[in-house]
Image (spheres, rainbow, N blue to C red):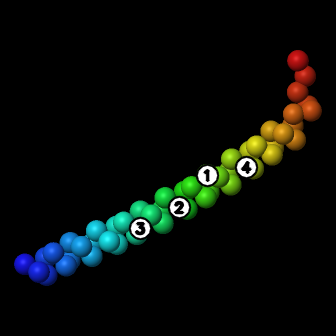
Amino acid sequence: MNEKIYKTMSRAGVTSLVLGIVAAVTGIVSGIMLIINGTKLLRKRSEITF
């Protein structure tokens, strides 16, 4: 019984760790992409004519 609980807790801990890493990487990549796109838009702002 104790081994089953230990294995379940280990799996839950590993899963939480992996999901946390994936979420952090996704957030960082999204932030970098937003900054790059924002700078591109600001540079091209003078080319827009109405």
Residue kind at label 3, given as amino acid type: Val
Residue kind at label 1, given as amino acid type: Ser
Q: Say what secondary structure mark 1 lies in.
A: helix
Residue kind at label 4, given as amino acid type: Ile
How many marks the image carries: the answer is 4
Any mark on residue 30, and which? 1
Q: Determine crowd level at label 1: few under 14, some 14-19, many 20+ residues with C-alpha closer than 10 A.
A: few
Residue at the extreme bottom of the image, as rendered: 3
Q: Which residue is mark 2?
A: 24
Q: Is residue 45 above or below residue 13?
A: above
Q: Is residue 8 above or below residue 25?
A: below
Position of 19 with respect to 33 (left or right) is left
Position of 36 with respect to 17 (left or right) is right
Q: Which residue is mark 3?
A: 18
Mark 3 / mark 2, whichever is N-terminal = 3
Residue kind at label 2, given as amino acid type: Ala
Q: CA distance from mark 1 to mark 4?
A: 9 Å
Q: Quadrant of the C terminus?
A: top right
The answer to which quarter of the image holds residue 37 is top right
Residue appearing at x 81%, y 43% in the figure: 40
Mark 4 / mark 3, whichever is N-terminal = 3
Residue 4 x %, y %: 13, 76
Q: Is residue 16 above or below residue 49?
A: below
